[in-house]
Amino acid sequence: MSVWLVPVASQAQSQAMQKPAAAPVAASAPLATAIATAAAPHKAIACPPYADGSKADATPIVDAIDRNHDGKMTHREWAAARAPEPSWRMFMAKPEIKKQGYITREQFLAEAPPPGIDADCDGKITLAEFLATKKWKMGPGGPGGPK
């Protein structure tokens, strides 16, 4: 079972996504704008996968959640970052992680991110992109969902 959530888009959303992507949000834009951009409903057609076969870098998520930088994401830190609770529960369903009561940096980064989570295809998954998964729905055919 994957610890990531799966996006499902309507037919209208899927058709809208066939159009060229808008320019990425400028670095000077407010975080709220970046989150709104990343949170837009979409189907898993972005990245990963990447053309070169590389894996997305999720360290920006860990760096944002692990506020004291001890390499352990506690539930308190997870909740403070407003990270998706279903993802926390999926990690905690693993006996080793449940026993220790926190998610290590290594455990989080060992999980393969789902297709489409890197909305801007820059190779890094940000907290804003992770927060956008709260709007995703579990569905057939996606990672962690029934086939």
Image: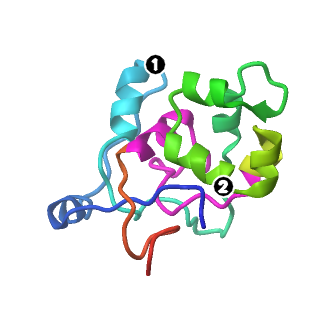
Q: Quadrant of the C terminus?
A: bottom left
Q: Is residue 58 above or below residue 67?
A: below
Mark seen at residue 63: none
Disc 2 residue crowd, few under 14, some 14–19, many 20+, Cα 10 Å: some
Looking at the rendered structure, the kind of residue marked 1 is Ser
Q: Quadrant of the N terminus?
A: bottom right
Compared across the picture, whether 120 is left or right of 39 comes to right
Instruction: Give the residue drawn at x 48%, y 34%.
Output: 128
The residue most toward the bottom is 147
Looking at the rendering, the stretch of residues picked out in magenta corresponds to: 109-134
* Residue 23, image x, y percentages: 36, 41
Whether residue 86 appears in magenta in the rendering, the answer is no
Disc 1: which residue: 28
Looking at the rendered structure, the kind of residue marked 2 is Ala
Residue 18: image quadrant is: bottom left
Helix, strand or loop status at disc 2: loop
* Residue 50, image x, y percentages: 58, 65
* Residue 32, image x, y percentages: 38, 22
Disc 1 residue crowd, few under 14, some 14–19, many 20+, Cα 10 Å: few
* Camera-nearest label, 1 or 2: 2
Whether residue 121 appears in magenta in the rendering, the answer is yes
Q: Main secondary structure of the magenta part?
A: loop
Give 82 or 61, whichever is nearer the viewer. Answer: 82
Instruction: Give the residue drawn at x 49%, y 25%.
Output: 27
Instruction: Give the residue drawn at x 44%, y 60%.
Output: 6
Helix, strand or loop status at disc 1: loop
Give 122 or 138, whichever is nearer the viewer. Answer: 138
Give 39 or 65, whichever is nearer the viewer. Answer: 65
Compared across the picture, whether 142 is left or right of 14 comes to right
The residue most toward the left is 12
Give 15 or 137, whichever is nearer the viewer. Answer: 137
Disc 2: which residue: 93
